[in-house]
Image (spheres, rainbow, N blue to C red):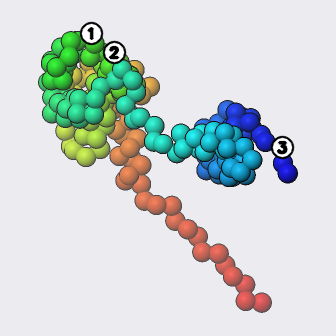
Amino acid sequence: MREPMPVQAVVREQLGGRPPDLATITVLVREGLEHLEHDPGAARLCLAAAERLLMPRDPFPAGGLLAWQIKRVGRYLDHQLDDRITLKAVAEQVRLSPSYFSRCFRRSFGAPFAKFVMQKRIERAQQLMVTSPMSLGQIALACGFADQAHFTRAFTNLTGGAPGKWRRQITDRDLQPPPRRTAALVSGH
């Protein structure tokens, strides 16, 4: 008969600092079943640990926005991206004070509000640069930037390159014909 292994040791041994995987859960269940008859307490601990690992994690971290608030903020930003967006206006959409909304927003979206809005604007600008013949100045205004210079500074800060250069690289890559394959000569002798 095997000597019982404490649950913490099983988890530590299996995880090694990594997130739990199916093998870890399998070991916990197996250990729990082996201990069921002679050590019901250890069996309960193993099975409870396996159950905790199988339970879905909360996708909304504590202190973050609620699911309906996240959806409303996302829709509002998508529809208002070409206009001036203030923290206060978005906070009002989800019925929170600006300072509390700011903290919750960062927890839910993983970035400060202003940086997130800027990233969304750059993403939309990149999409427009690829899919439309609009000039960079027109794209800048369509994405809520004050002018082309503001757009260029923000784009360069975020991506490391100028928008015109980025657009040329993308369109040049799309216009190039695929590389030709040379047929290998096969010798019949």
Q: How crowded is mark 2: few (under 14 residues within 10 Å), some or many (20 or more)?
A: some
Does the residue at mark 2 contact the one at mark 1 (Cβ under 8 Å)?
Answer: yes
Q: Which of labels 1 and 3 is toward the front?
A: 3
Does the residue at mark 1 contact the one at mark 3 (Cβ under 8 Å)?
Answer: no
Residue 179 screen position, x and y as percent:
51, 61
Q: How crowded is mark 3: few (under 14 residues within 10 Å), some or many (20 or more)?
A: few
Question: Which residue is rendered at x = 40% and y = 27% of the image?
Answer: 61
Is 142 above or below relative to 151?
A: below
Does the residue at mark 2 contact the one at mark 3 (Cβ under 8 Å)?
Answer: no
On the question of residue 146 being in view, the answer is: no
Residue at label 3? 3
Question: Which residue is rendered at x = 31% and y = 34% of the image?
Answer: 123
The local secondary structure at tag 1 comes to helix
Is 175 above or below relative to 124?
A: below
Residue at label 2? 103
Residue 61 located left or right of residue 95: right
Question: Which residue is rendered at x = 60% and y = 75% of the image?
Answer: 183
Residue 181 screen position, x and y as percent:
55, 68
Q: In which quarter of the image is residue 75?
A: top left
Residue at label 1? 99
The local secondary structure at tag 3 comes to loop
3D distance between C-alphas at marks 2 and 1:
7 Å
Tell which circle, 1 or 3, labels the residue nearer the N-terminal end.
3
Q: What type is the residue that disc 1 sits on? A: Ser
Question: Which residue is rendered at x = 45% and y = 37% of the image?
Answer: 57
Q: What type is the residue that disc 2 sits on? A: Arg
The local secondary structure at tag 2 comes to helix
3D distance between C-alphas at marks 2 and 3:
49 Å
Residue 142 screen position, x and y as percent:
17, 31
> In this orientation, which residue lies closer to the viewer: 91 or 11?
11
Tell which circle, 2 or 3, labels the residue nearer the N-terminal end.
3
Residue 6 located left or right of residue 104: right
